[in-house]
Amino acid sequence: MIDSHAHVHDRSYDDDRAEVIARARAAGVTQIVTVGCDLDDSQRALDTARTYDTFASVGIHPHEAIDAPLDIASAFVPFLADPRVVAIGETGLDYYYDHSPRDVQQRVLRAQLALARETGTPVIFHQRDAFDDFTAILRDEWRPGMRGVIHCFTGDAAQARTFVDEFGMRLGIGGVVTFKTAEGLRDAVRAVGLAPLILETDCPYLTPVPHRGERNEPAYVAFAARKIAEVLGVTPDEVVAATDAGARALFSLA
């Protein structure tokens, strides 16, 4: 299994990171992408990827957009030169918390999309309560051949179809799919089928059933795989094979 979106560089793992990654590998997790949310966080992600033989991304999360450098492209260049950095993101819009002004979020998202377009780098997106503005920006900035994933997708079937059919996106599915209250997400999974899905944990957040209330970790990606298999009426092995292939294609993993 590939955990396509984790934060194993998060400080909540500072006391047992090696053990967390060892448990992941024992559970069958073959690769992890640890995802940056600002420049300092992206450096921590890259340092962790180098230490533990995983991958990383560099990004400015919408929460952190207010503190983004004026020249995002120049700030990202040293990261993108490292072969362990496989994506730009997470970037996007978050109108639920509005930690950064919406116009600033939009500007920073457009800057990261422009860099992704110029460099051919895939993009990891965060979108919460901003579907209309987010898709409007994609219609301006997205081009054929660009690659991306809507991380922690929790939208409805119509939104899923828009992302998959109009933009060719993949959908990152994690622990939320196991929640009792997530029938709308399960309907969206049924609407698009297995092909566009990739697995993620978003650890240390969004811990799946049956570990709710605990810190999440990459080993728990298996619970999302099992629930997707149940929803789609396929085997967990089929889910793992398809989602691994999707993650490898998205991030150009060997």
Image: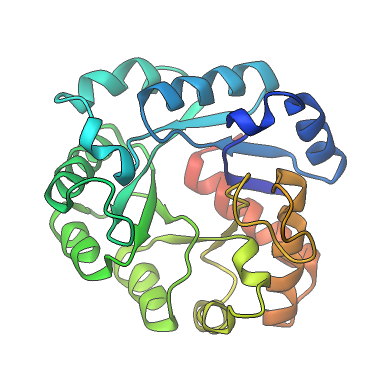
Residue in the foreground of this view, choosing between 208 and 246: 208
**Residue at point 52% right, 30% down?**
56
> Residue 98 at what x, y percent from top left?
26, 54
Asked if residue 152 shows in the view, the reply is yes
Judged left or right of residue 215, residue 127 is left
Q: Is residue 141 above or below residue 70?
A: below
> Residue 208 at what x, y percent from top left?
70, 62
Q: Is residue 102 above or below residue 51?
A: below
Tally the numbered discs: 0
- Dividing the picture into quadrants, the one containing residue 22 is top right
Q: How is the image coloured?
A: rainbow
The C terminus appears in which quarter of the rendering? top right
> Residue 88 at what x, y percent from top left?
37, 37
Residue in the foreground of this view, choosing between 4 and 122: 4
Asked if residue 145 shows in the view, the reply is no
**Residue at point 51% right, 21% down?**
44
Judged left or right of residue 169, residue 226 is right
**Residue at point 75% right, 79% down?**
230
Judged left or right of residue 35, residue 100 is left
Judged left or right of residue 132, residue 224 is right
**Residue at point 69% right, 63% down?**
224
> Residue 113 at what x, y percent from top left?
24, 43
Q: Is residue 63 above or below residue 41?
A: below
Q: Residue furthest right?
A: 26
